[in-house]
Image (cartoon, rainbow, N blue to C red):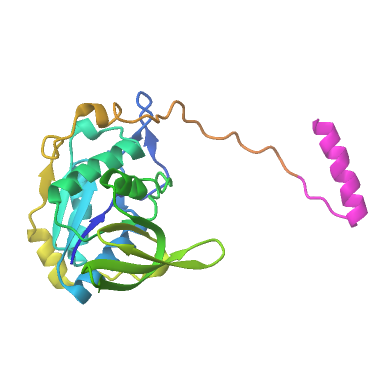
Amino acid sequence: MNIIVCIKQVPETTEVRINPQTNTLMREGVKSIINPFDMYAIEEGVRLKERFGGKVTILTMGPPQAESALREAISLGADDAILLSDRAFAGSDTLATSYTLAGAIRKIRDYDLLICGKQASDGDTAQVGPGIAAHLDIPQVTYVKKIEEIKDKSPSGEKVIRVERMTEEGFEIIESPLPALLTVVKEINAPRLPSLKGLIRSKQAKITHWTHKDIEAGFENLGLSGSPTQVVKIFSPPPRESSQMLSGSIEGLVEKLVRIIKKEI
């Protein structure tokens, strides 16, 4: 089974800087880590490889420094890694990002399953995974907490996957043909630590670098040009005014609140 795990390198701190001209994140000089939810995606991909055979390819889009995230993924058991890095990708929103990643996946071609973390800690949109599936026209299951089974479905012989998907009320059991895309939540597993052998292999691994030319993508669909949503303004919320603690009986508190609200109006 060939698995592609899409990851993102994100700032480790919430104290990020914003480019005032483009309103995009400035990543230079900020320590970065693998997006926490993507760690669960990597772990699940490696577990499936150990169970069914095949290989795990890690894919990310980002600046050259994102290569460190790919090497970390290899130390955790992944086999190959591809970095999409090009100035043409700068400023991508979720649509342009998913378009770019889907183009790379088409170039890879040989895959049975795509796995993503449910969302990135810097954007929190949870849109890139589903966007990749839409561009590739393959089934998707989001918020997966458990992979129950992968099997051949007779008489056609096609592979199917059965998973548990989290909902607000509980969970759903969903069966889907492969290839498919899953976004996973932290309940799915406990990520491992890198082994000494994995660390050595990650330092020696060759990271493949692709630009927009390698995935045959047009400029009109990339970066800021391919992003229909753009950040117009960024600002910090104003500090809260001083608050007060109310005490007393229920009836007295209600009267005090009514007076305060009327005064504010």
Stretch in magenta = 244-265
120 vs 91: above or below: below
**Residue 90 shows up from this direction:** yes
Count how many numbered circles sit on residues in the image. Answer: 0
148 vs 58: above or below: below
Question: Is residue 82 or residue 215 the one in the foreground?
Answer: 215
Would residue 126 appear left or right of 255 to someone viewing this image? left
- Residue 105 percent coordinates (x, y): 19, 49
- Residue 66 percent coordinates (x, y): 22, 47
165 vs 257: above or below: below
| Residue 40 in which image quadrant | bottom left
Q: Residue at x 13, y 71 (%)?
A: 197
| Residue 229 in which image quadrant | top left
Is 259 colored magenta in this rendering? Answer: yes
Main secondary structure found in the magenta portion: helix
Quadrant (top left/top right/bottom left/bottom right) for the C terminus = top right
Q: Residue at x 20, y 70 (%)?
A: 49
Quadrant (top left/top right/bottom left/bottom right) for the N terminus = bottom left
- Residue 91 percent coordinates (x, y): 30, 32
- Residue 162 percent coordinates (x, y): 35, 69
Q: Residue at x 14, y 36 (%)?
A: 216
Is 199 colored magenta in this rendering? Answer: no
